[in-house]
Amino acid sequence: MTDGAAQSVDPAKVEAFTDTIVGALNGGAVTLMLSVGHRTGLLDAMAALPPSTSLQIAEKSGLNERYVREWLGAMVTSRIVSFDAKDTTYVLPPEHAAVLTRAASPDNLAVTAQWMPILGSVEDEIVECFRNGGGVPYPSYPRFHQTMAEESAQSVLAVLIENIVPLVDGLPEALESGIRVLDIGCGAGRAMSLLASEFPRSTFFGFDLCDEAVQLARDEAKRRGVDNVRFEVKDIANLEEEESFDLITAFDAIHDQAAPARVLSGIAKALRPSGTFLMQDIRASSHLEKNMDHPIGTLLYTISCLHCMSVSLAQNGDGLGTVWGEELALQMLRDAGFHDVSVKQLAHDIQNNYYIARKT
C-alpha cells in the first residue's frame, strides 16, 4: 500500500468493518449449529425441558453427551441458549423456541438454516464454475428435496388452504365444484396432495424433472390416501398440453428453470381460455440498488449463486437466479401471453410475491 493510500484509510472504519465481518463469521457458524440442532431434535427437546445439564439434555434427545455439550457451547456464546454457571444448566428461552422448533412452524427458522450446509457442500464445484462457467446439477446437492419439502411445508402448506387459494377470486368455489389443476416443479408433491384431500371433486397433476422428487410425491399421495392426484417425471419446458387445465401453479419454481420463457409460454398454452396461472416467486426487485434494504437480500443472492442460478446453468439454461425480480417477472409473463396479471402478498410472508395471471 502506498503512503497516499495508507493515509486515506480511516482506522475507525476499518475497525467497524472488522466487527461486521467477525459478526458474519459467527453468524455463519451458528447457522450450521442451528441446522444440527434441528436435524438432531435438540432444539425441540430443549423447548420441552426445564433448566437441564448437558447429560440430561443428551439423555432426553438420545444423543452423545460430549457432542451435545460442545453444541451447547455454540448456542450459549451466540446467546440462543441461556446458561447458569453455578448449576451448569442450560435452557432454551420460550421466546427463542418460538422461532426455532418444529412446534413453531411455519415460523421455524431452523428449517432455513439447513440450506447453509447444503450450499456449502458444493463450494468446490461452484468455485470451478467461477473459473470455467457452467453450473452444478441438482444431484450434487445432498438432502435437497427433503429440505425443500420442509421449507415448502412452512411457506406453502401451512397457509395454502386458508391464505393462498383465496388470493384467486372464485378459486375455492371452483375447486369445490371440480376443476383440473397442474403444479409444475411439484417437488415432493405435498401441495397437490393436500389440495387433493381437501377438494376430492377436482383432479390434480404434478410434473417434475427429478425422479427422486416424483417418487417422494407419489409416496405422499399414498400416505394421504388420495386417488385424485397423479405425479409424472416430465420436462416442463416441453409441456405439450393444449388448453387442458383450469389452474396451473408454480411454487418457487420458475426462476430455477433452464428455459423459463419457454416454460411460461407452455403454461399459457396449457391453460383453458378462462384459466389462471398462480405463481409464487421471490419478492424482490430486478434492480440491485432497490434490494439494498431487503431483509434477507444477502441470503437470497447467496442461494442464487450457489443453487438457483447454478442448477439452471448446469442445463445450459438462462440462469435467471433467485432474485430475477418483480419487474422481469411481469415482463416475462406478458411476453408469454398473460395480459391480465396482478401481484398479491401475504402479510406474514416477507419472501414471496403471488402472481395471478390470466390470458384474457
Image (cartoon, grey):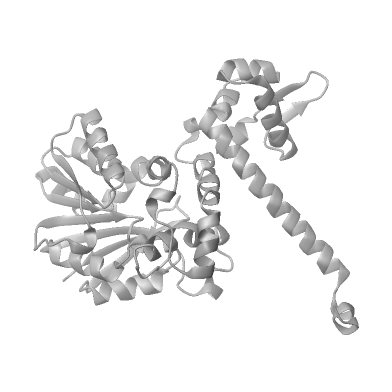
Q: Quadrant of residue 289?
A: bottom right
Q: Position of residue 95 (x, y in %)?
A: 61, 35
Q: Quadrant of residue 212?
A: top left
Figure quadrant of the N terminus? bottom right
The correct choice, above or below, for 249 with respect to 360 in the image is above
> Visible in this render: residue 300?
no
Seen as rendered, the residue at the extreme bottom is: 4
> Visible in this render: residue 111?
yes
Specify whether 86 is left or right of 58.
Answer: right
Specify whether 42 is left or right of 266.
Answer: right
Which residue sits at x=53%, y=48%? Answer: 121
The correct choice, above or below, for 146 with respect to 85 in the image is below
**76 or 68, nearer to the observer:** 68
Which residue sits at x=35%, y=70%? Answer: 329
Q: Position of residue 314 (x, y in %)?
A: 38, 62
Q: Quadrant of residue 198?
A: top left
Specify whether 86 is left or right of 67.
Answer: right
Q: Position of residue 24 (x, y in %)?
A: 69, 54
Q: Position of residue 41 (x, y in %)?
A: 53, 27
**71 or 286, nearer to the observer:** 71
- How many numbered tags mark residues here? 0
Figure quadrant of the C terminus? bottom left
**314 or 57, nearer to the observer:** 314
Specify whether 352 is left or right of 84.
Answer: left
The correct choice, above or below, for 309 with respect to 234 in the image is below
Which residue sits at x=38%, y=49%? Answer: 139
